[in-house]
Image: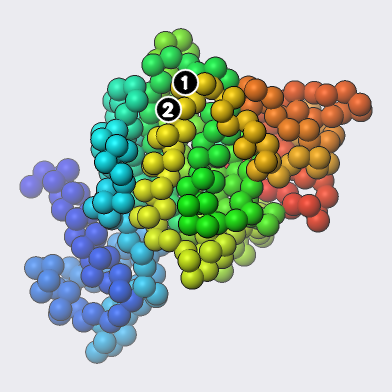
Amino acid sequence: MDAPSRAHQSEARRRRLVALLADGGFHSGQTLARKLRMSRGGIWKLVQALREMGVQIESLPRQGYRMAHPIDLLSREEVLASLPPETRAKLIELDVLLTVDSTNRYLGDLAAPEPGRARVCVAEVQTAGRGRRGRSWLAPFASGICFSMAWQFAELPPGFPALSLVVGVAAVRALERFDAREIGLKWPNDLVWQGRKLGGILIEMRGESAGPAHVIIGIGINMRMPADVRIELAKHHAVLVADVHEVLRERCPSRNALIAALIEELTKALESFARQGFDGFIDQWRMLDVLQHASVKIVNGDQTVFGIASGVDRDGALLVEVDGELRRFISGEVSVRKQEVMPPEMDGIA
C-alpha cells in the first residue's frame, strides 16, 4: 500500500473511531477492535493519535474508552439534507474533514469553481487555522465551526473591498434563523455578542486583480468553547469570547444545521453582491455595527489614531472623526477605548 493510501486509511479509521465514541458512553477496546476490524493495540494507537489532535478521550480499566462529553460530529449527509434544492444545485462539492491544516488553504489548492457555484470545506480540527495578519485561530476539536467557501465572481462587483462586511451580514442572518439576538459586527471582520467575540472572517483572493475574482471565504464561529480555552485566550490575547450555546442555550442548533444555514445565506449574499455591490447590505450592516459612535484607537502600521467611529462608506472603509475631520480607513487594528462599551479584541478568524 502506498503512502497516500495508508494516510487515507488512517484518516478513515480515526473518523470511524470518533463516530463510535461520539455518544459519550464507554466502549471497550475489544468491542471497538471488533467493529473496526483491527487489534486492541491498533485501537490504542488510534486513541493516542486522536489525543494528539486535541480530542479528549478518557480510558478506565475494565470499562474502556469514552469521550469526555458527547459531541456533535460534522456530517456531510446531514448538511446536504438541510439545504434547499436550489442551493444544493450550486454546490460543486462539500468536503467534511476530520483534520486539516487550514480549510482556506485546502480550497485554495483546488481549481476555482465556475462563477455562481461554490465549493465548501469544513473540518473538526484545524492545525494551522489563521486569522487576519497571520494570527492563529484556536478552535479545539468539535468546539466550533471551521468553514471555508470558494467562490468566483465573473467580474469584480462594485464595492468589492466591502466583501468581508457582506459575509458578516450573511453570517448574522444564518444565526438569526435560529432566533439568535444581539449579534453585532465589528469592522472589518468580527462577529460579537455582548461585547465578546463570537466568530470571525478571513477573505483571501486568488488570481489576477482584473477579470474573474476567485475568493476563499473563511468563517470561524465558536459553538461551545471549553473553559480552559476561554481562560487561555483572555490571558494571552485579551480576548473575551462567547459561543452559540451561550447565546441560544437549549435552542442551540447542531453544527450541521448552522453550516447549512451559512451555505444558503452566504450563497444568496454573494449572488446579490455580484449584482448590486455593497449597496444592498450597507443599511443592515450599519444596524449591526458595534463601533458606531464609539471612541476607538486605530493602529495602521506605525501610525496610531484616536477618534470617534462614524460608520462605513459604500466601499466598506471605516469612517472615523478625528479632531473634527472625517477620515477614511481601509485597514488597521481597531479597538474600543472605553472598556465598558467593548473590550479590546484580536481581529481575525478561522
Q: Is mark 2 on a helix, strand or loop?
A: helix
Q: In this view, does 63 lie above or below 223?
A: below
Kind of residue indicated by mark 1: Arg
Q: Considering the numbered disc 1 on the image, is that residue within a helix, a strand or a loop?
A: helix
Q: Left or right: where does residue 6 sit relative to residue 234? A: left
Amino acid carrying label 2: it is Glu
Q: In this view, does 94 lie above or below 258?
A: above
Q: Nearer the viewer, residue 304 or 262?
A: 262
Q: From the viewer's perspective, is 71 left or right of 320?
A: left
> Which residue is outermost to the right?
323
Based on the displayed image, in which of its 4 quarters is residue 101 positioned? top left
Q: Report the residue at 47% width, 47% height from top.
A: 174
- Crowding around mark 2 (Cα neighbors within 10 Å: few <14, some 14 to 19, many 20+) is some
Residue 79 visible from this viewpoint: no
Determine whether 259 is above or below 214 in the image. below
Residues marked 2 and 1 touching at CB (< 8 Å): yes
**Furthest residue toward bottom:** 62
Residue for badge 2: 271
State the image coordinates of residue 70 (x, y, percent, origin top left). 36, 73
Cα distance in 3D space between marks 2 and 1: 7 Å
Residue at the location (37% across, 55% down)?
257
Residue situated in front as seen by the camera: 37 or 210: 210
Position of 253 with respect to 6 (left or right) is right
Report the residue at 25% width, 65% height from top: 19
Q: Quadrant of residue 111?
A: top left
Q: In this view, does 344 lie to the left or right of 132?
A: right
Residue 146 locus on image (x, y percent) = 42, 48
Residue hosting label 1:
275
Q: Can the viewer see residue 18 in this picture?
A: yes
